[in-house]
Amino acid sequence: MSASDIRRVTNQAPPLAGHNVVTGDAALSAAVLRHADGETLDSLAPLGAEAGTTDAQEHGRLANRHHPELVSYDRYGNRLDEVAFHPSWHWLMERAVGHGLAAAPWAPTGAGSQTAHAHVRRAAGFLAWSQTEPGHLCPISMTYAAVPALRASESLAAEWVPRLASTIYDFGLRDPAEKLGALAGMGMTEKQGGSDVRQNITEARPVGDDVYELHGHKWFTSAPMNDVFLVLAQAPEGLTCFLLPRVLPGGDHNRVDVVRLKDKLGNRSNASSELEFRGTTAYRLGAEGRGVRTIIEMVAATRLDCVLGSAALMRRAVAEASWHVAHRSAFGGVLADKPLMQNVIADLAVESEAATALAMRLAAAVDRPDDQHERALRRIGLPLAKFWVCKRTPAHVAEALECLGGNGYVEESVMPLLFRESPLNSVWEGSGNVNALDVLRAIQREPSVLDAWITEVGSAKGADRRYDRAVDSTLALLGESMGSPDELERSARRLAGGMATLLQGSLLVRYAPDEVADIFCASRLSGHGGTFGMLTGGDQKAVVQRATPTL
């Protein structure tokens, strides 16, 4: 064998680049058309095209290779408490904001209100653009989610919502009045409490009309270079929500000490920090003692983005896996033609499509805030989807990585980045137990939410016997458990998983191609083997073809 023969590369899949991440995704495109219209889908085509470019992929790689750095002091010893990012981070952020993925859908006028489907459009764009690099979508998500909570104060909303809804990325800590756009974050958890925020000890001392000084800390606050944060602290009347700007009106920096940046498993392009407050100025948002109720709308919106982000990880993973096996030969044929590999890819594809369908359905509910059914469905659907979709993602991404063999275990393949990211959305904004218990809380306190779930899943009854049996079985389990609080809590995960799966099934049975719905009902509602690639029938080849990207 000559030296030239050694260097000649054969039987390697070409890079997956140059495809449209929106219009080339059959499940996502169908969801946009179902919940919005063709004009909305067409408006997303430029975002989808840019997301599939080699430039976007390279910027995603660089943003993760070069981690953010804390700059505590300047050369003269002046305190800065700033974070420096690689230029690729700013490239990604500029486009995410420019495509309207931050708070633009909430804008009363302008880019976010050109259609009646602003939140569906934004959700589809978020799902697609997340596939370039997931970490930078954290500050984008918090900016989107801050607006509903800001409505607790008419004056603060009037001041900040226009800045947050801007489609101009204007990085840096400066006088808010001088900025063309702003980003928001939130700080809820503390060392001693974690998700149990009622244990928070950060103190808020009144110093003027709705103005307070904060003394305490926050244990996990991402994107500390954002312009404004919603935080929880103990005021005289109890746990209260506050708006905390990094820079005060007039340009003076607020006293926010960035203690250190977290060294995280994944999400490494995004800075997550520990903060300390010593006389930090904050403005009350909502009534004293009503902090959780005030900030809960922000939590709900970030949970939607957790589901969208996990669906994005699944889609990128199955796209890479299906692309690889379509271009790789082994054991006498193309891998995609091998029955067992078809089984694995089809199983991954069905999981991905179910996640996309449910995420987009919940985004559509945000576009209809005055509809009682949609509000109730969103209330119960978000913790259900957050529990189930985010919990399913790590196993899904791991299986997709394995489809690439050793190639999938090296950084250049992007699969390790996806795998490190895959547990994140199940941890943030309430872990699995927190969300499963939130489902029970919603059912017990708000009977309309169970009615909304029953109505939603009931709309698909009669189309598939396996689906009908699963609905009856889940309702029976719920009825059996409701009489005993301990038994109900022990069954929380089982109930949440079953109810979430049925929401997915109701969408696929009604709207997905027959081969997708058939495999879903056979594998998810009739006893799944516990790992991917154990399907027992169905048109698996058609499902694989539907999921494989095309250039």
Image (cartoon, helix red, strand yellow):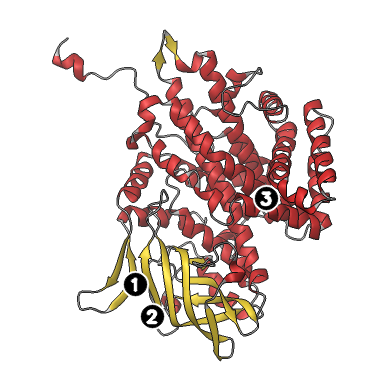
Q: Which residue is mark 3?
A: 436
Of the numbered discs 1 and 3, the one sitting upstream in the chain is 1
| Label 2 to label 3: alpha-carbon separation | 41 Å
Q: Going 58% across and 52% down the picture, which residue do you hit?
A: 431
Residue 412 visible, this angle: yes
Numbered tag placed on residue 256 in the rendering = none
Determine the residue positioned at 53% across, 25% down: 345
Please tell me how crowded label 2 is: few (under 14), some (14-19), or many (20+) other residues with Cα within 10 Å.
some
Q: Is residue 314 above or below residue 218?
A: above
- Nearest to the eye among marks 2 and 3: give it: 3
Relative placement, left or right, of 502 versus 462 is left
Q: Which mark is residue 253?
A: 2
**Whole-percent x, y for residue 363 in the image:** 65, 51
Q: Are marks 2 and 1 in contact (CB under 8 Å)?
A: yes
Q: Which mark is residue 81?
A: 1
Residue 504 as seen in the image, left or right of residue 269: right
Quarter of the image containing the N terminus? top left
Whole-percent x and y of residue 413?
36, 34
Q: Name the residue type under label 3.
A: Ala
Q: Measuring from the top left, give residue 381's x and y in whole percent.
A: 70, 49
Q: Residue at x 62, y 76 (%)?
A: 239
Rounded to the nearest whole Å, what is the CA distance between mark 2 and mark 1? 10 Å
Secondary structure beneath label 2: loop
- Marks 1/3: CA–CA distance: 37 Å
Q: Secondary structure at mark 3?
A: helix
